[in-house]
Image (spheres, helix red, strand yellow):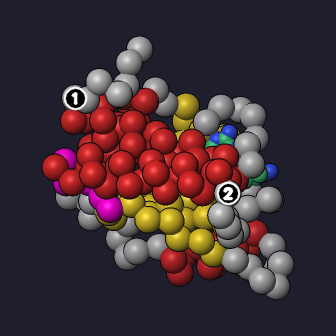
Amino acid sequence: MRLHICAVGRLRSGPEKTLIDDYLQRFDRTGRALGLGPARIVEVEDKKNAGMGAEAQLLRKALPKGAVICTLDERGRVLSSPDFANKIAGWRDGGRSDLAFIIGGADGIDPSLRAEADFSISFGQMVWPHMMVRLMLSEQIYRAATILSGSPYHRV
Ligand SMILES: C[S@@+](CC[C@H](N)C(=O)[O-])C[C@H]1O[C@@H](n2cnc3c(N)ncnc32)[C@H](O)[C@@H]1O
């Protein structure tokens, strides 16, 4: 199952980008034997600054057909890392070939797109900057692969 992190805005070089690339590379290596990956970042940019509705349209166009849609949203479900890993494994075992995570822009994700999602994950009630959410999600995706492969990276 391929993973797509679909985000509003461009993340240029910098420490967050270096870490994200590193976690996603590690995920690709660990996930291969598990039928997971590769993971890629898809960035959309609303150059006319027309708001959430326009961003939602760009995000919809970026989604692979038939993908599981999982939004990142502070109003979503808070999961443990093993629960997140099992959620991913469940979608894979259900025969889904693409999983798309959606991260919104400064105003969040348009309610119409939120309503189309299969699932919504929260990283807590605080609002995080979108680049931090990308970074935390990339790490959790890698952690999920290590949990599913039984590697000792995840310890509680
Ligand atoms: C700066 S936030 C926008 C917050 C916006 N006010 C809202 O109501 O959604 C940018 C994006 O980061 C993600 N995000 C921010 N905080 C989050 C959290 N606690 N859990 C999950 N995703 C979060 C969401 O995808 C959000 O659309």
Amino acid, disc 2: Gly
Of tags 2 and 1, the one toward the viewer is 2
Write down the region rendered in magenta: 34-38
Q: Earlier in the sequence, mark 2 or mark 1?
A: 2
- The reply to whether the magenta stretch includes residue 99 is no
Q: Which residue is label 1 attached to? A: 150
In the picture provided, is 156 more to the left or to the right than 92? right
Residue found at the very far top of the displayed protein: 156
- The mark found on residue 51 in the picture is none
**Residue 120 in view:** no
Q: Which residue is label 2 attached to? A: 14
Q: Nearer the viewer, residue 45 or 12?
A: 12
Classed neighbour count for the residue bearing mark 2: other residues with Cα under 10 Å, few (<14), some (14–19), many (≥20): few
| SS label for mark 1 | loop
Q: Position of residue 88 (x, y in %)?
A: 33, 45
Q: Is residue 67 above or below residue 129?
A: below
Q: Nearer the viewer, residue 129 or 76?
A: 129
> Residue drawn at (30%, 31%), measured in percent from left and top?
147
Q: Is residue 149 above or below residue 133?
A: above
Q: Position of residue 83 (x, y in %)?
A: 38, 30
